[in-house]
Amino acid sequence: AAITAIDLSQMAACPACRRDNPEGFLFCGFCGARLSDRAGAVASERKVVTVLFCDLVGFTASSEDSDPEKVQARLDPYRRKVRDRIEAFGGTLEKFVGDGVMAVFGAPFAHEDDPERAVRAGLAIVEAIYELNEIEPALSLSVRIGVNTGEVVAGDVSVGQRLVTGDTVNTAARLEQNTPTLEVLLGESTYRLVKDAVVAELRVRDRGLVLE
């Protein structure tokens, strides 16, 4: 009987069921999920994007002893509004983490005015929060938003990779943490790209500029 040797280094693990498949398979032979590219790094690329972070101020502390259903009832309208505003300006929602939101403008689909789109989405979110509080005063929501532009490593979400990673993302998160309530804080790189389209108060705060 013939014996066939299999080079395990050429096997591709399925991102869904984690079982190994021979080189050349586009879909998992066990569960049918799409397999990642053999050269996983090839699926990633460097590109310039604008990252937006949004977070509810004081929400975690105020929800510590609350009923989970009541907490969810406060979060749902907020999340819907944020998603709507992000997508209305052509952004991609990367993730919800608790009451925090991360969105990307420029990946996977890019527009020449992505920085401006991100800034206007941030302003629209703040306006939406004001509207929510007027309609339902009991919600009593406050947000802060950080926006930063720069180079990232953009992955292929269809094969389980993060949409974007890099210092640009980390800086956007730090900006958000230092933003005054119900304001948008821009990184310097973002401000340079949008200064002719938006009016920003030149108040420096942790590498950013407050937009009002």
Image (cartoon, grey):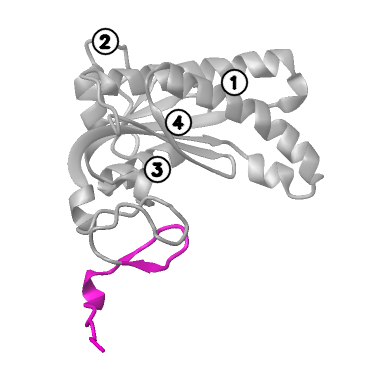
Badge 3, how many Cα within 10 Å: few under 14, some, many 20+? many
What secondary structure is marked by label 3? helix
Lower sequence index among marks 2 and 3:
3
For the record, the magenta segment spans 1-21
Mark 4–mark 3 Cα distance, whole angstroms, equals 9 Å
Q: Whole-percent x and y of residue 23?
A: 24, 63
Q: Nearer the viewer, residue 41 or 191?
A: 41
- Residue tagged 4: 145
- Residue tagged 3: 173
- Residue tagged 2: 197
> Which secondary structure class fits the magenta region best?
loop
Q: Is residue 184 magenta?
A: no
Mark 3–mark 1 Cα distance, whole angstroms, equals 20 Å
User: Which amino acid type corresponds to the residue marked 4 in the rendered image?
Assistant: Ile
Q: Residue at x 20, y 35 (%)?
A: 48
Q: Nearer the viewer, residue 117 or 91?
A: 91
Q: Whole-percent x and y of residue 148?
A: 30, 34
Q: In the image, is residue 24 above or below residue 125? A: below
User: Which amino acid type corresponds to the residue marked 2 in the rendered image?
Assistant: Ala
- Asked whether the viewer can see residue 162, the reply is no
- Residue tagged 1: 129
Q: In the image, is residue 13 above or below residue 149? A: below
What secondary structure is marked by label 4? strand
